[in-house]
Amino acid sequence: MTDGMRLLDDPVRRAVVRIGAPADGYDAPGGSFWGTGFFIAPRLVLTCAHVVAKGLGAVWEGARAIGVVTDGGRRLAGTLLYGLPRPRDPGRPPLTSWPMPDLALISVPAATDDDGCLWLADRYSGPDDRIRWYGWSGDAVSQGPVFLSGSGTLTGSRDMPHVLRVTSGSSLYHGVSGGPVLDERTGAVIAVVKATGKDSSGLATPVTGLRALCDQGPRAAAQWHGAVAAHDRYHYRRYARGGDSWPRLQRRLAEERAETVTGLGPHERAQLYALFAELPPPGCAGDVLELVRLARGEVLRPPYDINDHNPRSWRDGAALLRTPRDSSAEAARFALEAVTVYAALVYDWVRATTADPSARVLTGLRAWTERFVPRLDNEVIQERIPAILDGARRPAGAHADVLVEIEAEPGDNAYGWRVKLLDPRGKVVSTQMSARPAPRERLEDELRAALRLQLSKGDLGPARACVDFMLPRELFGEPVDRWTPRHPDPGEPPGPQTGPLGRHRLVALRDFERRAHGPYEQWRSRWDRITAGPLLPFVPPDPVAEQSNGAGAPVPVDAGGVSGGEGARRLAELLDGGHPAALCVRAELPGGAGEEFHREARALVSASGDGAGLRAGACAARGAEHPAAWARDLVLLYDPPDRPPLPSDDLFEPLLPWNES
């Protein structure tokens, strides 16, 4: 065993626990041993959802139905706080592979700080990492559970299970699911063992998958932020009082590799993260990404593509400004400069966006930042940081829009989907897609989680990402502007994440059919006129108004309904004729209702000025708490021709041949 392994093994073993039913005889051969877990903060254990699911309904109902046994033999009772994802029927958990992220957070009230907590990685780790894994098994010996460990490599992408390959030590026996996977170089937990395979291989879930709690509602998000804050407070508290701590362990690991720790070392990060732990958390991933973008701009580095990361806490943003695999002097200098700028930006953001920020905490963060300014080599950045601290933050740039593509698949009532994030230039920077076709009535539920994630990346402060739905014409009557990103928690007031999309965001339809054939000249020329304005409303069929060659762009206004009949036929003709914008209704409005719609919609078009104004006006008309009758079923077609083409990739993914234990 190398010195590095010895440095890791003892503190890890103190934090790794056995999980099962809280009953006598739990440790006996053949008893109810479920799997492994480990402390990530005082009284908080992380494991796999499929491990605790062996306790069936009582676990998911919040009963104290989980047994936790420490390495020293202490028997503790735990309660499930959250499992991701929750099974539809807790009494009958899935028989096949548990869906990602397959993580669970357990509260163990009787645990103490002495039980030890592992250090969580603050960012996705790179491919082919050398790792050390740990866990308990009930199958390796006949006398009860035994503690196992081994070395190996980890390969994978951010949003999928990592492939874990054992190269030395024990094999991945039944029961090690839920155990920690550590980066051998830094000692940080980067993944959780998920499943065993063949030939000393398995799967592991990235520990950053726990961020998915932030998409489950305010209570789950508060639980995640609370767990991260407790983790960071604990580790800095241990470091500050002297003795063993994970920041010191990381430094010893570096020294063992004969590396000199310069720049922003583990001690400095531990203190900074403890200060971040006292701040109000960011509202969404877009807030963190914006400050990372600004920080990289200050140190003259290009911005990240949003696809690269999904940060949910201030510590996540700081991690994006480090290059943990690069120990060069240049990388250390960049990390120190960029993270110091970022800390100043976080200070300014919290001060500007929080009604009553804690003066004590903000004072501490400012002091941390000012202490590092003299250590920076770049005099321009040295001068810039005090200005940021005093409120001279550069204006936020444009944020991203969300594009939902729904495509009819072979078979009755079957649709595949993609949810994309588009930067201000129209470039696709992030994509999630369906694993299998969904019926029309299930589309909202099936793509809700993906929509929620992309909106979190596209939102920025109070500004909300726009949402375009590229649909087959048969779905134009679908009330997508009434879809919601997630179900509200009990008692939670409506808002951008729980209320109808069209009430809080700009929502428009786009035509899947003509997109599949690519833009054509008439479509482009009409689009140029729409974006320049002014807009001229007309009621089809009106060939004179439609073909107007005067100053202005004709915009159809039709109360015939897009769900079928003459209204759908007229809209199809308008789309084929290259019209990029129109105001319609879902179902035909008869008599006086149709006249009112034509009158109000024509007025909206005339007052809009250009395409952007039309989009905003339609949102305002249907976004009121109690929209007027004419706007309740308003459908906005707004279809730019030169946004990204449809991809040719497969919408489906294969099943994985792994056994969860």
Image: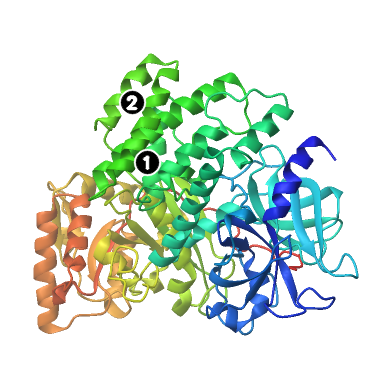
Q: Where residue 290 is drawn, which disc sits there?
A: 1
Q: Looking at the image, which is closer to me, 511 or 208?
A: 208
Q: Looking at the image, which is closer to me, 572 or 60?
A: 60
**Residue 51, quarter of picture:** bottom right
The x, y position of residue 531, in whole percent, is 23, 46
Q: State the SS at label 1.
A: helix
Of the 4 image quadrants, the one containing the N terminus is: top right
Q: Looking at the image, which is closer to me, 399 or 548?
A: 399
Please say if the residues under marks 1 and 2 sit with CB atoms less than 8 Å apart: no
**Residue 655, quarter of picture:** bottom right
Q: From what the image shows, is residue 450 above or below residue 157?
A: below
Farthest residue in the right direction? 142
Q: Is residue 107 visible?
A: yes
Of the 4 image quadrants, the one containing the C terminus is: bottom right
Residue found at x 39% / y 22%: 373
Residue type at mark 2 is Ile
Q: From what the image shows, is residue 649 above or below residue 475?
A: above
Ranked by sequence position, the earlier of labels 1 and 2 is: 1
Q: From what the image shows, is residue 465 above or below residue 236?
A: below
Q: Circle 2 sits on which residue?
A: 385
Q: Where residue 622 is drawn, which disc sits there?
A: none
Q: CA distance from mark 1 to mark 2?
A: 17 Å
Residue found at x 36% / y 36%: 364
The x, y position of residue 392, in whole percent, is 25, 30
| Badge 2 density bin: few <14, some 14–19, many ≥20, Cα 10 Å | many
Q: From what the image shows, is residue 169 above or below residue 202?
A: above
Side of 90 where 455 appears, left or right: left
